Image: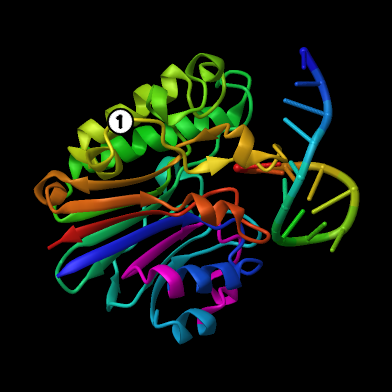
Amino acid sequence: MTLTIATWNINSVRLREGLVARLLTEEAPDVLCLQECKAPVDKIPLEAFRAAGYGHIVARGQKGYNGVAILSKLPLEDAGEVDFAGLGHARHVAARLENGVVIHNVYVPAGGDIPDRALNVKFGQKLDFVAHLRDFFRDNAPQKAILVGDLNIAPREDDVWNHKALLKIVSHTPVEVEHFTDAQAAGNWVDITRQDIPDGRLYSWWSYRSPDWDAADKGRRLDHIWASRDIAAAGHASRILRPVRGWEQPSDHAPVLASFDL
DNA sequence: ATGGTGGCAGAGCCA
């Protein structure tokens, strides 16, 4: 089978229910992982997604903030969550497909504006979250696993519009990138997007604060699809759907997709 | 150096 998976920070699943339905209709991934649903699980508009053919949902939510959901055309089994860094936030949920593949949907804390944990608690929480993720998958080596989500870190020079300008900007600081690459290495994860598209600038997020986001193009690649080493070679057809950032009342993130021949 | 926008909730926090 070919499994197509998409990840998208939706920034309110209720406000953008119609955009989610449109993506499901136009792209028809087998699985869509959402972050920043900003709703308790019982407020997720399940009917609209069920009507589009996505009757299997595993989610964690909270009022107003965070929230992750996995919508699927294929049957899913809830595989639990990890409270990385002990924040008590709805930032991770896992699901298992019938073929045994486990999907981890992750929403890493943004980390505030000041890249110094002594001055900014949220930055420390972000580093701690990624360190816990590193340790978790070091101790529970992922197999037949896919990890997707808004990891809120752009690791490479060509994952940001201006590497030098962003070295002191949260999401691209050296200490964050080090945590990111350590976590990737500890789980033996493979960055499927960059396996498929090794060269050139690649962004999945453009700030709302730039009115002319498309022309200015000051983007960052914050959204990622990783696979465990054993299934990485099955990954292909990676895409970032930049036009979605231009839809009516959009999220500030574009969906990222990949397919796996399993 | 600053401020720029958006969502939730209904002021201020978070991104």
- State the residue in front, A152 or A209: A209
- Compared with A8, A157 (above or below) is above
Residue drawn where x is 55% and y is 22% of the image: A117
Please provide percent x and percent y for residue A261: 14, 61
Q: Secondary structure at mark 1?
A: loop
- State the residue in front, A213 or A145: A213
Chain for mark 1?
A: A
Please provide percent x and percent y for residue A9: 51, 53
For this view, does A203 lie left or right of residue A13? left
- Give the magenta-colored segment's residue range: A25-46
> Can residue A64 be spotted in the picture?
yes
Residue A136 sits in which quadrant?
Answer: top left
Residue A113 sits in which quadrant?
Answer: top right
Residue drawn where x is 58% and y is 18% of the image: A118
Disc 1 target residue: A199
Q: Total label count?
A: 1
**Which image quarter holds the C terminus of chain A?**
bottom left
Residue A191 sits in which quadrant?
Answer: top left
Please provide percent x and percent y for residue A193: 30, 43
- Compared with A165, A181 (above or below) is below
Graded by Cα atoms within 10 Å as few (under 14), some (14 to 19) or many (20 or more), the crowding at tag 1 reads few
For this view, does A50 lie left or right of residue A195? right
Residue drawn where x is 60% and y is 41% of the image: A214
Instruction: Assess whether residue A237 is covered by the magenta stretch.
Output: no
Identify the amino acid type marked 1.
Answer: Asp
Please provide percent x and percent y for residue A73: 33, 77
- State the residue in front, A104 or A258: A258
- State the residue in front, A8 or A75: A8
**Which image quarter holds the N terminus of chain A?**
bottom left
For this view, does A165 lie left or right of residue A201? right
> Can residue A93 be spotted in the picture?
no
